């Protein structure tokens, strides 16, 4: 059962935030409204590119590439990625970096990642504030970190190393999490802020994850947004979720619910223009359906921001 | 890092089945039902990717035998690579070992079918670079030539066409070679059952033989060898774009 969370979406925008944001400073551009590049759309997304020229409202402004679906692969996946790079601005997103792990950064992961960055020149890359491997085992899931000052310092130091080796900006994403550890002595939002402060990296703010975490851990998502370092937000994620065994799970398998749209509008009023991506990883609909939902996100975005034009290469 | 180390150790023990949900919940002060959710997610990622990569074998075997094999594989084979599909790579070898150990219900055909299904994925994602110009007959670098004791390819084709599971090939089936490759320039996955003509074209390319020498050796006109190679290039498992005479 989801709690009802209400907050007027017409709160006045704090005057100082947007002016100092990464987008306003030109560290990252505003790319508009995009979707993920998925195998099921390998043909249809290019057909949509042509069709949507006559259907301006349903255009896709940029693509997010889930790097694990392309790193180390040749053949059709690589050919499609090369073609996509020639057609849209790209950003990279990963789930396997394991930035919170205690083991050294995985060179077998970084090598193909950096090779792919050099090949198709995405504007930034991102991964989650969590760990996904330990003791030589890959869990293929985002395992939450304890929210402590020492863990924040540990993660920030690893991000520093990563940024030192990368030619493009790195963003950390707030993940969904379903457990809390008794050893955590920071609030989630303060933990994220600490990592941002110490590492200097950007933030991929997943609006659905804020909503899901607020529901599962009983906090106010609007307070979370108010307290977050919004000046570092370089990208937003929008997605849907599913109730499962007494929790709400960030499944990316449904349409974006209205409550997440409301939180999105509230956030956007405080960040100014930020590239926004619709995530869909399960029950992936045809590209036309995805583009229609992307258009809804754009309309909400324009209702907050006015008709801001995305950056074009 | 004591806190993080304790968390990862406890969580690892949970995921590997070395500690119970209740033990880990008590140690980390976390809700047991939510810890159980993570244990389930981690298990299901590997089981799900085995399901995804071996859909035909799953159909042929049927539940619950399939679930039994997949769960045994997942317990025995921790994923050790960031690429999720690689967690399914060891499944044919796992079955082969179980066949040697006389696993009830497991047949040699099942192992061959699993091998075929994995090779389809491996060839589809092969990073082999197809050269631009190929004045000499050259093997498509993505090509895998797989020898099977059973007619696996024909069986998979029959499965693809039907909602029912066809009868399994019996003993005494004809061994055959299947060619799997990315078809240039679309990179679509192609399959062929190798014929003697295909094998001859492969031999010419692999051994770098000149078409004229092959024609002489076979006692055939040059046109015969050129047609053979042209057909192979058209199929896509061999690359050949002979320069035209001035």
Image (cartoon, coloured by chain):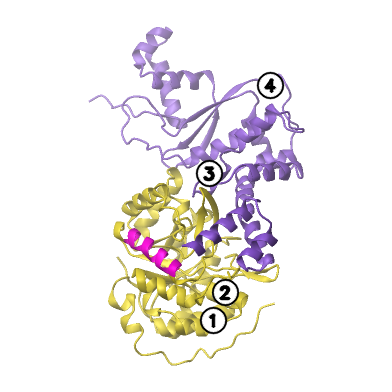
**C-alpha distance separating marks 3 and 1:** 38 Å
Residue A155 on the magenta segment: yes
- CA gap between label 4 and label 1 equals 64 Å
The residue where tag 3 is placed is: B86
Residues at badges 2 and 1 in contact (C-beta under 8 Å)? Answer: yes
Q: Residues within 10 Å of mark 3 (few under 14, many from 20)?
A: some
Q: Residue at x 52, y 62 (%)?
A: A287
Chain letter behind tag 4:
B
Tell which circle, 3 or 4, labels the residue nearer the N-terminal end.
3
Choose mark 4 or mark 2, whichever is in front. Answer: 2
Query: Distance from label 2 to label 3 (Cα)?
Result: 31 Å
Q: CA distance from mark 2 to mark 1?
A: 8 Å
- How far across and down, in percent of the image, does residue B212 sit? 34, 13
Please name the residue that numbered disc 2 is placed on. Answer: A213
- Circle number at residue A221: 1
Tell me whether marks 3 and 1 sit on the same chain.
no
Could you confirm whether marks 4 and 1 are on the same chain?
A: no
Q: Are marks 4 and 2 on the same chain?
A: no
**Residue A226 appears in view:** yes
Q: The residue marked by circle 3 belongs to what chain?
A: B
| Dot 4 alpha-carbon crowd within 10 angstroms: few under 14, some 14 to 19, many 20 or more | few
Spot occupied by residue B232 in the image (x, y as percentages of width and height): 45, 26
Tell me the chief SS of the magenta region: helix
The colour one sees for chain A in the rendered image is yellow
Which circle, 2 or 3, is nearer the viewer?
2
Assign a secondary structure to mark 4: loop
The answer to if B174 sits in the magenta stretch is no
Distance (Cα) linking label 4 and label 2: 57 Å
């Amino acid at each position: 059962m989801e709690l009802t969370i209400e907050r007027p979406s017409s709160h006045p925008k704090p005057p100082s935030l947007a002016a100092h944001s990464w987008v306003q400073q030109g560290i990252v551009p505003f790319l508009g409204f995009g979707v993920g590049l998925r195998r099921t759309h390998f043909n249809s997304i290019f057909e949509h590119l042509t069709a949507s020229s006559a259907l301006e409202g349903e255009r896709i402004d940029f693509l997010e590439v889930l790097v694990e679906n392309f790193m180390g692969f040749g053949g059709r996946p690589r050919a499609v990625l090369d073609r996509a790079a020639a057609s849209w601005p790209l950003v990279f997103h990963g789930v396997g970096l394991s930035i919170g792990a205690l083991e050294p950064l995985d060179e077998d992961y970084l090598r193909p990642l950096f090779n792919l960055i050099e090949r198709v020149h995405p504007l930034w890359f991102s991964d989650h504030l969590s760990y996904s491997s330990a003791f030589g085992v890959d869990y293929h899931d985002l395992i939450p970190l304890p929210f402590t000052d020492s863990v924040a310092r540990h993660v920030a130091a690893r991000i520093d190393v990563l940024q030192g080796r990368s030619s493009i900006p790195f963003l950390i994403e707030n993940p969904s999490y379903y457990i809390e550890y008794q050893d955590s002595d920071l609030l989630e939002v303060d933990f994220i802020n600490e990592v941002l402060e110490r590492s200097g990296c950007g933030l991929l703010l997943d609006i659905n994850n804020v909503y899901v975490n607020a529901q599962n851990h009983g906090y106010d998502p609007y307070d979370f947004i108010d307290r977050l370092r919004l000046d570092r937000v370089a990208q937003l994620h929008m997605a849907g979720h599913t109730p499962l065994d007494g929790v709400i799970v960030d499944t990316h398998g449904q349409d974006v619910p209205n409550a997440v749209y409301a939180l999105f509008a509230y956030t956007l009023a405080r960040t100014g223009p930020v590239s926004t991506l619709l995530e869909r990883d399960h029950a992936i609909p045809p590209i036309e359906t995805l583009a229609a939902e992307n258009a809804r996100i754009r309309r909400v975005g324009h209702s907050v921001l006015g008709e801001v034009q995305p950056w074009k290469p | 890092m004591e806190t993080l180390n304790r968390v990862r150790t406890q969580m690892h023990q949970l995921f590997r089945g070395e500690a119970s949900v209740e033990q880990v919940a008590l140690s980390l002060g976390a809700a047991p039902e939510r810890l159980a959710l993570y244990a389930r997610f981690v298990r299901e990622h590997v089981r799900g990717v085995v399901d995804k990569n071996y859909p035909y074998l799953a159909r042929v075997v049927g539940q619950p035998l399939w679930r039994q094999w997949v769960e045994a594989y997942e317990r025995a084979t921790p994923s050790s690579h960031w690429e999720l599909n690689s967690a399914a790579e060891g499944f044919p070898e796992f079955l082969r070992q179980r066949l040697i150990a006389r696993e009830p219900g497991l047949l040699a055909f099942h192992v061959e079918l699993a091998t075929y299904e994995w090779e389809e994925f491996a060839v589809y994602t092969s990073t082999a670079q197809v050269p631009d110009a190929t004045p000499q007959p050259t093997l498509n670098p993505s090509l895998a030539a797989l020898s099977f004791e059973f007619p696996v390819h024909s069986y998979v084709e029959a499965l693809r066409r039907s909602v029912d599971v066809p009868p399994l090939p019996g003993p005494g089936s004809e061994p055959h070679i299947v060619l799997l490759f990315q078809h240039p320039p679309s990179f679509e996955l192609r399959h062929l059952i190798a014929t003697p003509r295909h094998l001859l074209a492969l031999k010419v390319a692999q051994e770098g033989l000149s078409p004229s020498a092959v024609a002489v050796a076979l006692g055939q006109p040059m046109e015969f060898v050129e047609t053979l190679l042209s057909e192979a290039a058209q199929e896509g498992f061999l690359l050949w774009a002979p320069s035209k005479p001035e």
